[in-house]
Image (spheres, rainbow, N blue to C red):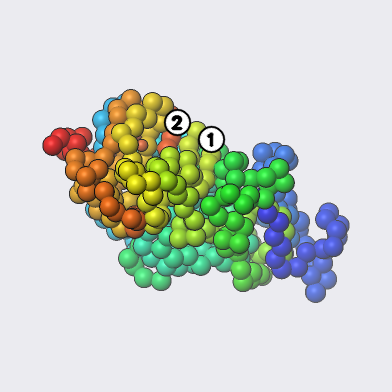
Amino acid sequence: MPHYQSRGSIPRKRHVAFRDDQGRLMAEELVSTEGFSSIYSLVYHLYPPTMIAAFEPPTDLSPKIAVENNIAPRSFRGFRLPPADDYLAARTPVLVNDDVCLSLAAPTRGLNDCFYKNASHDELLFIHQGNGTLFTGYGELRFSPGDYVHIPRGVIYQIAFDTPENRLFIIESPSPIAFPKKYLNRYGQLEEHAPFCERDLRTPQNLRTYDQKGNFLIKIKKNHRLWPFVYASHPFDFLGWDGCFYPYVFSIHDFEPITGRIHQPPPVHQNFEARNFVVCSFVPRLFDYHPDAIVVPYNHSNVDSDEVLYYVDGEFMSRKHVERGQITLHPIGIPHGPHPGAVERSFGQKQTQEIAVMVDTFRPLRLTQAALSLEDPDYFRSWLE
Ligand SMILES: [Fe+2]
């Protein structure tokens, strides 16, 4: 996130002695990315962030791959994933490659008896159902349905849900998840033509400084291994921080759709990008207004991207038998398009209420065993009259 923020108490100059009101010297930590060449923050801890007391062997979280080379259109009923109590165990990878891991989760509880850090991947939690709070050293972030909760790698967090009925679609990326470069001016500000702006971002609030020593369990995920680490000080001991590296929330309901006289291509819906994939947001919008416009998407040969759609809400004009939480995968090499009757049904329609998240990957996705357990096996036949 390339926009400067500051919370709590920080010294007037960086890299100088800084004491709290009891005269204790603070431990400064530079949190930097791409070595020292990209966004960073400076954090002021009560205790050094280095006090490892113990660590144990990891748990293997590698996705169990069932289909290495997929060629067929696929559909998965995401809401059939059974709920699970443990927030970390609930996260179930369904579609993966070396650039991205897409998971579903229905956690009935948050994470409050330990802390969690993804050390190797940025996390984008799309909140489909549920309200709650993300707790970090940088501050707190409230979330509700439709929110993308962006957690850069390295941020230690806990999460709390208000009720047990929660549904998440999780995007994990080993490369930074950022706003599309096409929306940014040369100073990094979102341009006027972008479908959202800085005012739409919700940044950490209510910084609380935890002055505690003891044994604090942080489960650290690194490349599909989960390592239990015990630290000797509370991870949320920030007296203050400033910089451009921090978690934030963006609501899909704040995405302002770009519409036109004839059909607009999917890139107008782009919301995020990372190495070898993009994330797009489809939101309620007026349909195309040329008198002869066909408002549903044309048939489409995705020559070099796997297309994943996660259906959130509303009517999906171009599809039949779509339900909330469903995922479709239209792979490289196989054309897809509107279902039979969809074009005819669309004439005279003025608007759509659909909400969906799309992930286009530029390299093929593998399917996990969990994905197959949710699959609608006849989907590939669904374009037959
Ligand atoms: Fe497409």
The percent coordinates of residue 190 (x first, y second) are 63, 50
For residue 165, say whether it is visible: yes
Q: Are marks 1 and 2 in contact (CB under 8 Å)?
A: no
Quadrant field for ligand 1: top left
- The amino acid at mark 2 is Phe
Q: Earlier in the sequence, mark 1 or mark 2?
A: 1
- In the image shown, does 262 or 24 lie closer to the viewer? 262
The percent coordinates of residue 292 (x first, y second) are 32, 43
As drawn, the label of residue 275 is 1
The percent coordinates of residue 335 (x first, y second) are 30, 29
As drawn, the label of residue 362 is 2
- In the image shown, does 55 or 162 lie closer to the viewer? 162
Q: Residue at x 32, y 65 (%)?
A: 165
| Farthest-out residue, left | 385
Q: Secondary structure at mark 2?
A: loop
- The amino acid at mark 1 is Arg
User: Which quadrant is home to the C terminus?
Assistant: top left
Q: Residue at x 62, y 52 (%)?
A: 192
Q: Is residue 29 left or right of residue 357?
A: right
Q: CA distance from mark 1 to mark 2?
A: 9 Å
- In the image shown, does 81 or 60 lie closer to the viewer? 81
- In the image shown, does 359 or 375 lie closer to the viewer? 359
Q: Secondary structure at mark 1?
A: loop
As drawn, the label of residue 48 is none
For residue 89, say whether it is visible: no
Q: Residue at x 45, y 49 (%)?
A: 259
